[in-house]
Image (cartoon, rainbow, N blue to C red):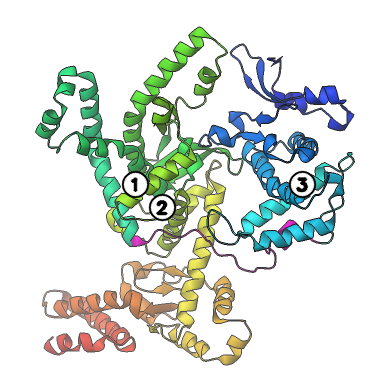
C-alpha cells in the first residue's frame, strides 16, 4: 500500500522515540522516501519491510542501486528485530550517509552469522567471550577478494559495527553486555600505537603515467573530430550505409578502429581530470556540465573545477586545475550531449504518462552529469556512471596500454606526490610535458573556502614525507654531498651517539626534518630559515656554493654544475665581456671546480679546463 507524507521520511522520523512506539506504530514507520512534483513525499520503504531501500540523495552519484539496500532476509531471522531497531535508532540519532548505514549493516552480517553458527539463540545472549572469540576468528580470516588476511580497515569496520549494535540497544529488550570492556574496536584491530602511518595506495610510476597521459592527450587532441564524425554518421543515412568507405576517406581504417577511438573518449577525459585535479571517483561522477569557473586577475588565469563531495560532508567543492582539465571537460560535454538529450526525452515521456514515475523522478538527479553510461544490459538505458562500472573501464583502458592495476584512488595519491615534489622543484614528467602549469597552488588553496581540505591535508603529508626522505638521504653515508652545510651533515653521520638517541636513522631524519627548513633552488637544497640570499641564487646559481645553508647533491645537482662549468670555460674565450664580466666568469669557474672536485666529477671535465 502506497503512503504519502507531507515531509520526508527522515524528517518524519527525527522526533520519534522508538522505544515509546508500540509494535503497530513501529512497523508502519517510514524508512525512506522521494519527493513528488507537488512537494509531498512518497514512501519507498517502511520499517516492516524485509528490504530497506534508502534514498538516492544519501549516496554519492556513482553508487549502484543494489548498494543502497539493507536486505534483512540475508540475516539469521532470530536477530532481525534487534538489528532493525539498532540501525533505525542509529539512523535517527546521527543521520549518517547511506554508505555509512549500509556499511554498518554489512559489517554486522559476519558477526551475526558467527553467532548463529555457534548456536547463540538471541542478541541478549551475546557475551564478551563470544565477542573475544569472534575477534580472534576475524584476525585469522582470509579475505575472499584479496586472498590475504583482513586489513585493519576491514577489522575496524567489523568491530565498530558490534560496538554500535551494543550502544544502540542499551535500554531495550535486546540489550547485551559490553563486547570488550577496557578495549576498543581500533585497539583490537591493531590500529593504535602504530606510530607513523604510510600510505598503502601505490603511486603510478612515472613510466606508466607517461604512457597514460601521452595517450589520453592524443585522444584529447582528436576528440572534437571524432565527435563531429560520429554525429555525421548518426545524422546522415547515406553516410551510415557506407560507413567504412566514409571513414577510410577520413583517414580511419574502418568502423572498428573509429568506434574504439570514439568510445575511449570518456575514459581518457576522466583520466586527465583525475590526474591533474586529485579528485576522488565519486567527485568525478558528480561533475555536472557547468563544471568549472575561471578566475582572471589580469596577471594570471586560474581554473577551478567544481563538483559535489559527500566523502567528508564538504558539499560543493572546488579544485585548482590546469587548463588541460578544462579542455577535457569541454570535450566530455560534447561527447555526453547525445546521452543527455536521450535522458531528457525519456524523462519527459515518463512524467507525461505518470508524474510520479520513479524512473522519471530519479533522472532529475543525474541528467546534467558530465559522465553517463549507456547500459547495454538494460536495453541501452542511460544511467549515472557508477564506481564499479568506472573501475572496470579504467582497468580495461589501462590493460590495453599495458598499465596494470589502475584504480581511481591511485591518481589522487599520485597527484599529491607530484605536488609535494613540485614544492621542492621536482615536477619531472608533468613539468616537462605540461609547462603551462606550475602546481604551486598552496596559497590559492588556502584562500578558497570551497577547497577539498582532505586533499590539501594529503598533499601536506606527502610534502612532510618528501622532506623526511631528503633529510634521511643527507644522513646516508652513500650520498655524496658538498656545500656550506655538508661538513656538519657528514660529521653527524658518524656521530654514533646521535644515532643511538633514536630507534633508527629514519626516526632521526623524521625528528630533524621538523626543525629544518628545506626548499629547492634547482641547483642545491636551501636550508635557510629566513630570506637568506633574497633569491639571488635564482639568477646566480653558483652563489649557493659559498652559502653556509646549502646542500649540493651529486645525484641531483652534479649535471647542473658540470653544465655551468663548461659554459663558463667557453665564456672565458670571449674578449668583449668587460673586466667585471671576466671576474665573474673566473669566480664561477672556481666555484664549479670546488663542487665538481668535492662530488667526484672533476675527472670528467678537467681536460676541458686544460684546453681552456
Question: In front: 568, or 44?
Answer: 44
Secondary structure of the residue carrying tag 1 is helix
Residue that appears at 56% across and 48% down: 453
Q: Are marks 1 and 2 in contact (CB under 8 Å)?
A: yes
At label 3, counting other C-alpha atoms closer than 10 Å, the crowd grade (few under 14, some 14-19, many 20 or more) is: some
- Eyeballing the image, is 418 above or below 375? below
Relative to 93, is 159 above or below? below
Q: Identify the image quadrant of residue 533.
A: bottom left
Q: Are marks 3 and 2 in contact (CB under 8 Å)?
A: no
Mark 3 → mark 2, Cα distance in angstroms: 35 Å
Compare marks 1 and 2 and give the one earlier in the sequence. 1
Which sits in the foreground, 376 or 287? 376
Determine contact: label 3, label 1, CB under 8 Å: no
Residue receiving disc 3: 164
Please name whichever residue, 361 or 79, is drawn nearer the observer in this view of the structure. 79
- Magenta span: 183-206
Position of the C terminus, as image quadrant, is bottom left
Query: Disc 1 marks which residue?
Result: 397
Residue wearing tag 2: 406
Q: Position of residue 379 (x, y in %)?
A: 40, 24
Task: Give the residue drawn at x 84%, y 42%.
Answer: 169
Amino acid at each position: 500500500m502506497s503512503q504519502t507524507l507531507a515531509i520526508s521520511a527522515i524528517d518524519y522520523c527525527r522526533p520519534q522515540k522508538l522505544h515509546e512506539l508500540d509494535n503497530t506504530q513501529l512497523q508502519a514507520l517510514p524508512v525512506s522516501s522521494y519527493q513528488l512534483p507537488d512537494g509531498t513525499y512518497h514512501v519507498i520503504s517502511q520499517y516492516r519491510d524485509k528490504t530497506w531501500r534508502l534514498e538516492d540523495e544519501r549516496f554519492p552519484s556513482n553508487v549502484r542501486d543494489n548498494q543502497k539496500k539493507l536486505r534483512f532476509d540475508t540475516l539469521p531471522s532470530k536477530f532481525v528485530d534487534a538489528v532493525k531497531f539498532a540501525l533505525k535508532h542509529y539512523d535517527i540519532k546521527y543521520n549518517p550517509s547511506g554508505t555509512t548505514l549500509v556499511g554498518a549493516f554489512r559489517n554486522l552480517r559476519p558477526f551475526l552469522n558467527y553467532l548463529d553458527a555457534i548456536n547463540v539463540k538471541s542478541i541478549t545472549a551475546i557475551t564478551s567471550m563470544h565477542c573475544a572469540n569472534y575477534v580472534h576468528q576475524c584476525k585469522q580470516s582470509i579475505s575472499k577478494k584479496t586472498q590475504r588476511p583482513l586489513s585493519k580497515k576491514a577489522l575496524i569496520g567489523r568491530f565498530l559495527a558490534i560496538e554500535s549494535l551494543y550502544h544502540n540497544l542499551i535500554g531495550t529488550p535486546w540489550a547485551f553486555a559490553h563486547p570488550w570492556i577496557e578495549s576498543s574496536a581500533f585497539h583490537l584491530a591493531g590500529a593504535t600505537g602504530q606510530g607513523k602511518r604510510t600510505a598503502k595506495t601505490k603511486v603510478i610510476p612515472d613510466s606508466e603515467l607517461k604512457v597514460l597521459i601521452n595517450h589520453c592527450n592524443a585522444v584529447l587532441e582528436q576528440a572534437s573530430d571524432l565527435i563531429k564524425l560520429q554525429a555525421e554518421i548518426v545524422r546522415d543515412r547515406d553516410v551510415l550505409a557506407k560507413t567504412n568507405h566514409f571513414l577510410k576517406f577520413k583517414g580511419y581504417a574502418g568502423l572498428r578502429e573509429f568506434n574504439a577511438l570514439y568510445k575511449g573518449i570518456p575514459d581518457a577525459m576522466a583520466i586527465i581530470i583525475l590526474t591533474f585535479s586529485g579528485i576522488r571517483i565519486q567527485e568525478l561522477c558528480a561533475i555536472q556540465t557547468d563544471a568549472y569557473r575561471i578566475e582572471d586577475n589580469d596577471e594570471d588565469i586560474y581554473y577551478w573545477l567544481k563538483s559535489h563531495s559527500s566523502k567528508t560532508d564538504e558539499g560543493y567543492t572546488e579544485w585548482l586545475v590546469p587548463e588541460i582539465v578544462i579542455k577535457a571537460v569541454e570535450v566530455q560535454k560534447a561527447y555526453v550531449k547525445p546521452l543527455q538529450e536521450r535522458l531528457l526525452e525519456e524523462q519527459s515521456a515518463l512524467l507525461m504518462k505518470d508524474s510520479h514515475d520513479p524512473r522519471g523522478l530519479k533522472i532529475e538527479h543525474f541528467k546534467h552529469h558530465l559522465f553517463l553510461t549507456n547500459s547495454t544490459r538494460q536495453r541501452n538505458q542511460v544511467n549515472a556512471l557508477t564506481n564499479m562500472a568506472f573501475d572496470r573501464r579504467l582497468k580495461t583502458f589501462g590493460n590495453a596500454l599495458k598499465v596494470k592495476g589502475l584504480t581511481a584512488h591511485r591518481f589522487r595519491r599520485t597527484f599529491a606526490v607530484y605536488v609535494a615534489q613540485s614544492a621542492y622543484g621536482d615536477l619531472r614528467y608533468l613539468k616537462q610535458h605540461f609547462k603551462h602549469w606550475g602546481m604551486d597552488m598552496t596559497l590559492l588553496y588556502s584562500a578558497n573556502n570551497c577547497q577539498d581540505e582532505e586533499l590539501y591535508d594529503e598533499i601536506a603529508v606527502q610534502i612532510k614525507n618528501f622532506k623526511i626522505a631528503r633529510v634521511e638521504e643527507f644522513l646516508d653515508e652513500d650520498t655524496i654531498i658538498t656545500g656550506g652545510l655538508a661538513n656538519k651533515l657528514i660529521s653527524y653521520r658518524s656521530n654514533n651517539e646521535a644515532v643511538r638517541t633514536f630507534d633508527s636513522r629514519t626516526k632521526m631524519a623524521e625528528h630533524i626534518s621538523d626543525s629544518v627548513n628545506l626548499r629547492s633552488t634547482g641547483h642545491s637544497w636551501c636550508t635557510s630559515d629566513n630570506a637568506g640570499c633574497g633569491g639571488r641564487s635564482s639568477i646566480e646559481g653558483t652563489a649557493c656554493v659559498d652559502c653556509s645553508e646549502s646542500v649540493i647533491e651529486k645525484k641531483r645537482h652534479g649535471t647542473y654544475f658540470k653544465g655551468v662549468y663548461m659554459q663558463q670555460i667557453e665564456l672565458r674565450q670571449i674578449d668583449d665581456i668587460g673586466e667585471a664580466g671576466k671576474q665573474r666568469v673566473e669566480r664561477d669557474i672556481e666555484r664549479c671546480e670546488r663542487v665538481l672536485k668535492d662530488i667526484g666529477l672533476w675527472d670528467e671535465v678537467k681536460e676541458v679546463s686544460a684546453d681552456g
